[in-house]
Every structure is written in C-alpha cells, then in structure tokens.
Image (tube, rainbow, N blue to C red):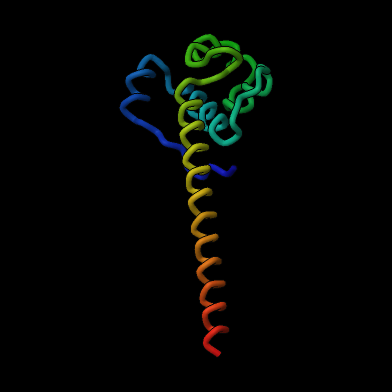
Amino acid sequence: MQRPWMPFYVGDYLANTRHLNRAQHGSYLLLISHYWATGSLPDDDAQLARIAGCSPDEWMADKPVLQAFFFDGWKHKRVEAELKRSTEKHARLSAAGQKGGLTQAMNREKLKWQNQRLR
C-alpha cells in the first residue's frame, strides 16, 4: 500500500527529541520516514547507516542515542500505531467503496430491468 504522507505531531516530536543534535535529528527523521514508507527497518548497521544518511563511523557514534527511540529490532511504537491506523482506515474505505460500487451496479441493473419491462 502506498502511503504518500505521514502524520507528524510536532509537539510530541520536539518533546521527545530536544536532546538530539542537528545530525541526529536528520538521521532520526530519515529512519522514521523510511519506516513509514516501507513498513519496517532492517536490523543491519550498514543499511541503517545508509538510510540515516551517515557514514559507518557516524552511525556507530549516534546509534546508541537513536536506538533509544526503538525497541525489539528497530520497531517504533508511534510509527507502528500510525501504520496500524492507516491500514485499518484504508481497509474501511476500500470496503465502503466496494459496497458503494456494488449498490451502483445493482441500481443500474434494476433500471435496465425496469426499462425492459416498460417496452
């Protein structure tokens, strides 16, 4: 499923990240953006460094600070919750669209049948 936008709560973000330096902010935002777009993060330092826009040395220096925002293999509580909400909303809208399409198709068939009876 394509997710063209991500909910971002500035107040929550700033309340939780005031201790980060500028480079760590950038890396963290790149990590959660990648997470949102793909549904997960790899548990591999070389890949995480590339996603975060860091050299391997920069990654190893910043990893402990950034890892504190994640749990169990680079899972993120807020992103997981938002992904779940997004998936559930998409399913609801899809079901409603299918139901609406079915209703329209039935109405067209009903009109066609009525028109044939009038002839």
Residue placed most toward the observer, 58 or 38? 38
Position of residue 111 relative to residue 77, above or below, is below
Q: Quadrant of the N terminus?
A: top right
Number of residue marks: 0
The residue drawn where x is 53% and y is 29% is: 30
Q: Quadrant of residue 10?
A: top left
Residue placed most toward the observer, 49 or 70? 70
Q: Residue furthest bottom?
A: 119
Instruction: Provide residue 24's location: percent of width, then percent of height.
Output: 48, 20
Q: Residue 26: in sight, yes or no?
A: no
The residue drawn where x is 50% and y is 62% is: 103
Instruction: Provide residue 99's location: percent of width, then percent of height.
Output: 51, 55
Instruction: Provide residue 86's location: percent of width, then percent of height.
Output: 48, 37
Position of residue 52 relative to residue 117, above or below, is above
The residue drawn where x is 53% and y is 33% is: 36
The residue drawn where x is 61% and y is 34% is: 38
